[in-house]
Image (spheres, helix red, strand yellow):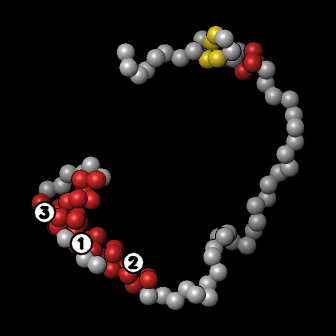
Amino acid sequence: MALTREEVLNVAKLARLKFAPEEIEKFQVELNDILSYIDMLDEINTDEVKPLIQVNNTVNNLREDKVRESLSVEKALSNAPDSGDGAVIVPKVVGE
């Protein structure tokens, strides 16, 4: 499946990218090369291939969950520059 110039322009629009006319032609060729490579991969028979779960033969070595004491609110807020009502107070950054 080859992409037309209009399809490349549509992809650029969706990605909010602007290109010069000569860049569009270049990307049209490059995207078509990528799509032809993907088509080539589709020709490979993978019926007997198991899905890859791990890249190597190791398994996840997870530590055991242990219940332990957490920080108190006062200790957690002790280094905050400003706090009140059990929360860190920060300057308003949106919509003034």
* Residue 38 numbered tag: 2
Q: Quadrant of the C terminus?
A: top left
Question: Do residues under tags 2 and 1 come within 8 Å of each other at their CB atoms?
Answer: no
Residue 47 lies in what quarter of the image? bottom right
Which amino acid, mark 3? Glu
Q: Where is residue 61 in the image (x, y as percent from the top left)?
A: 79, 58
- The residue under the point 14% across, 56% down is 20
**What residue does disc 3 label?**
22
- The residue under the point 48% across, 87% down is 44
Q: Where is residue 40 in the image (x, y as percent from the top left)?
A: 39, 84
Neighbour class for label 3 at 10 Å: few (<14), some, many (≥20)?
A: few
* Residue 3 numbered tag: 1
Q: Is mark 3 on a helix, strand or loop?
A: helix
* Residue 80 numbered tag: none
- The residues tagged by marks 3 and 1 sit, at their Cα atoms, a distance apart of 16 Å
Tell me if residue 63 comes above or below residue 32 in the rendering.
above
Which amino acid, mark 1? Leu
- The residue under the point 20% across, 60% down is 9
